[in-house]
Image (cartoon, coloured by chain):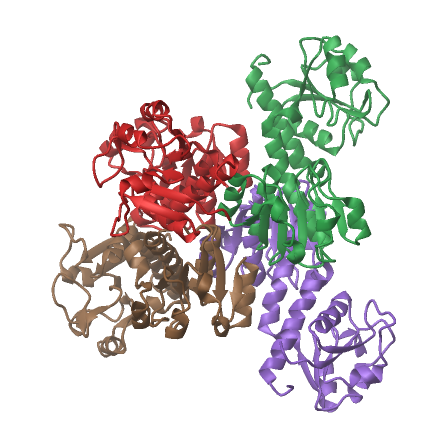
Chain colours: A green, B red, C purple, D brown
Amino acid sequence: MSVKRRFGVIGGDRRQAELARLLREDGNEVAVWGLWDADSGEAELAEVTAAEVLILPLPLCRKAGILNCQKQELETRELFRQLRPDQLVLAGQVQNAQAHEAKEAGVTLLDYLAREELAVANAVPTAEGAIQIAMEQMPIILGGAETLVLGYGRIGKLLAHRLCGLGAHVTAAARKWEDRTWAEALGCRTLRPDQLDGQLGRFHVVFNTVPALLLGEPLLRQLPQDCLCIDVASQPGLDFDAAAALGLQTVWARGLPGKLSPVSAAAAIRDTVYHILEERGDHT
Amino acid sequence: MSVKRRFGVIGGDRRQAELARLLREDGNEVAVWGLWDADSGEAELAEVTAAEVLILPLPLCRKAGILNCQKQELETRELFRQLRPDQLVLAGQVQNAQAHEAKEAGVTLLDYLAREELAVANAVPTAEGAIQIAMEQMPIILGGAETLVLGYGRIGKLLAHRLCGLGAHVTAAARKWEDRTWAEALGCRTLRPDQLDGQLGRFHVVFNTVPALLLGEPLLRQLPQDCLCIDVASQPGLDFDAAAALGLQTVWARGLPGKLSPVSAAAAIRDTVYHILEERGDHT
Amino acid sequence: MSVKRRFGVIGGDRRQAELARLLREDGNEVAVWGLWDADSGEAELAEVTAAEVLILPLPLCRKAGILNCQKQELETRELFRQLRPDQLVLAGQVQNAQAHEAKEAGVTLLDYLAREELAVANAVPTAEGAIQIAMEQMPIILGGAETLVLGYGRIGKLLAHRLCGLGAHVTAAARKWEDRTWAEALGCRTLRPDQLDGQLGRFHVVFNTVPALLLGEPLLRQLPQDCLCIDVASQPGLDFDAAAALGLQTVWARGLPGKLSPVSAAAAIRDTVYHILEERGDHT
Amino acid sequence: MSVKRRFGVIGGDRRQAELARLLREDGNEVAVWGLWDADSGEAELAEVTAAEVLILPLPLCRKAGILNCQKQELETRELFRQLRPDQLVLAGQVQNAQAHEAKEAGVTLLDYLAREELAVANAVPTAEGAIQIAMEQMPIILGGAETLVLGYGRIGKLLAHRLCGLGAHVTAAARKWEDRTWAEALGCRTLRPDQLDGQLGRFHVVFNTVPALLLGEPLLRQLPQDCLCIDVASQPGLDFDAAAALGLQTVWARGLPGKLSPVSAAAAIRDTVYHILEERGDHT
């Protein structure tokens, strides 16, 4: 990353603040406004919005139409009006409404979370974060434990790999034949999701990565009483009410990278930003 | 696999013979003709071709228009004429000419090698086979060795994983950002292919999995004199002539699953066959 | 474990309570007194001390001469006087004074913590606990991190193995040639402790397992400012005062099995107890 | 290794020749006689035996009293008479008779194979070699295979680790409680040797590392017909005659480091030699 640029970084959580720090470490000029741990180093908003590349928070809004920023209530529509067409504006989890606002204001707004590469990069701290939670919540160790991973996409693959690496016994449940082949190749035992019935009695912990209800009451009832359920999917994969009624311990773990590994999460965004700039080639 | 069927298995190498055996072990009725290790158990060709599902060899032809079979020279065109439209005919590596012949004869011919799932399943014995070759050819052990894996697709991923598991130090070279992220997540160090120049002096073995020339003479020259090069790609990834002129030891390893792990390779084909039948659902 | 026995379990922390529960699960008769989470199920002390095998807490005393028990202040000398020579009395971390008291009272007192097997069994949750702490304290993930493990005994070996399994890069520092050979065989890079000088600048986290001062001020000064130091040794391996003065983040992690994995820790004690009984063979 | 010395290297197999080469690469002065691949570079015997440190082959003798050397028949007694008391003479697998001869001749003869460190270093290529043999002999891949490792000493530990790393399912049978704890901690399932009866029907390959008969006819009979048995112990751990009668495929794999990884094996001897010199300190 040899070309240095002027970045503006606005709003967000600790991850966004770390991103500003990392960009500075690389020799870029970085003006910040409304950061999580804002101190005396902040610039005027007008100065920040004048930057060549503007990085808005992830998610972009904290409620409909309002920028995700603690400093003051700022409408995204209002913010976009202050920007120029020649600037590159990046944000995470952009809703249709804001994409439309940007278009109307003639602003080039890209959602970096939509990039495949960042999805992969976020899967790593998500998988590690899920393991951290399991370690914290379980009174037994993962070494030698019987673990079930539902889904074998990016997060499932990494979770299964790390659990094996910790000496756990891992069963991966995946619908696709090729995913099960992958899982077996990496040392897991496998099940199809429709084979879970009758197989759940031995698990110490279940990790769900699939954004679709896989574990309803009849299956949850088959889990041992002290089995821990950790759900890292964007939509719940288990019936939390039924689990509560059954006395099962559950964790719905959202946003793990930002919460547990903000520096790694920020580094992944930084790399994606650089990558976007490299591909565009028009900001050199 | 509860539904039993009548299979005909014809021609091919040891893998095909093992496939017939595995299908029988599952309770299917299997008539065979022209197998690699044919003995007294073979049926008449007419009986075999009458089967509900016919499995032809991989590859289908040993030379243009001639079935891959040692027993006698048989034209595929001639074979297809003896078949019925209600039969399912499966073969591996079907060329356009044979696909055309089958169509003309009104035969339903599918290429099982074209299935994604078998591609994954074949990657596992290919990766393990490449490691076997490295162990056989190198006077040092892989534990602690510096290894380079070119490409991080199916085979590259599995190779890198197993090399790590053997205690080797693994550097993966991959063009795509997300592939490098994956490789790092699984414990490898990474390079872009355009960063190889100047980095090659430390490797004890290089595995190529990319079907495109990555290692020409200038790069090969940078490898240590006793570095072993193993190429498992379908098209050579290194300049074998230049390597020979430099005195480098090279192995172009083709068809590893069938050669080194015929039973595992046969089991993968069997599973794919079952899967095709399950999806069609019309042969129950 | 087919022979069922009458156990008395007294005092201690959550681990001791879990031990009582596990012994009951195996079909033994277990009378308890003064447990950590005592409820209505407790017996009279006289009934508990009459058991065939008596399990006292780990550590045996909470202060000199006083049993480690919250229920009431009970002198170990007093307790021993109530016991019979034909009972087997087991405790953890028995001091010389108590060993002497037991001898005077004619009581057969064994220290289960002195068994090699329990030392191994405790190393597993210690290693996993150290990793949990690292995950909790670091703003980056362990996958891809540069980690240093000082010492390659039981805990160091397991720590290094799990860190590799999480995709971290591991350097093990060990004095003995054979330990470094082991570490290299399992995928680590190695250093002698006297080679640390000048090599410390790249580490994100340092784990010490050696009960001797290895990292004094001059070496600590070479660590990056945001490097985390976790010490799991019984005697400090790093100069905590110097580390504090340098602004390094440190954790002196003691008693991890009992704190983080009480059920696994209790299971290890149970297995050791069974093993002691099996070897003695005189309590069947 | 900064101090350069004058070595004499005599006799032996390819490993010994590689040792001479490695010593030269480190800048030492090395005179050789009777090497495996001897060419024009050999010196006169008298010149070689005059060296400061003399390295004799492993094993020292090819038959009683005769040096392990192809060049000419040389009695060890005769050789020792030509040496001086101030020389350090190193050899591998020294028998009592030769130790006695050396003493009588006033020669300082050390057996480097007796060093713990070399035993560890040899276990690594032994474990990797056993895996190479399994790959070569089995028609299925190790990934996903059910493997049994008898014994969990140096070789058993490394074998189990690498098999796990290749995606195999590993069961370790070990007599000692702490060894089983280790094996479980590293992701294996475990059995006591006396629990093998009735458990053997699922294995694809059995590796024995214990120099004592564990698998007699009654147990061998329980293995699947196509199970491979590889014995790497110095004394057979399975009844080879019974196995042959049962039609089981067996390999008694001796001396794997020298045969399969001569350079790694030579490097381990070189390191041990340096270590011996370093400890003596009197040859600087």
Image position of D173 (left or right of C41): left
In this view of the protein, can residue B156 be seen by the observer? no
Q: Is residue A62 left or right of residue D196?
A: right
- Establish if B42 lies above or below B241: below
| Quarter of the image where one finds residue D8 | bottom left
Question: Where residue C19 sits in the image (x, y, percent)?
Answer: 72, 70
- Vertically, is B207 above or below D251? above
Percent x, y for residue B244? 24, 34
Q: Quadrant of residue A59?
A: top right
C152 and B267: which is toward the camera = B267
Q: Is residue D100 above or below residue A137?
A: below
* Spot occupied by residue D9 in the image (x, y as percentages of width and height): 23, 59
Q: How many marks?
A: 0
Residue at (45, 64) in percent of width and height: D201
- Judged left or right of residue D268, residue A188 is right
**Residue visible at 60% across and 34% down?**
A121
Q: Is residue B247 visible?
A: yes
Above or below, C34 relative to B105: below
Residue located at (67% from left, 71% from top): C269
* Residue B275 position within the rendered picture, expressed as x and y whole percent measured from the top left: 49, 40
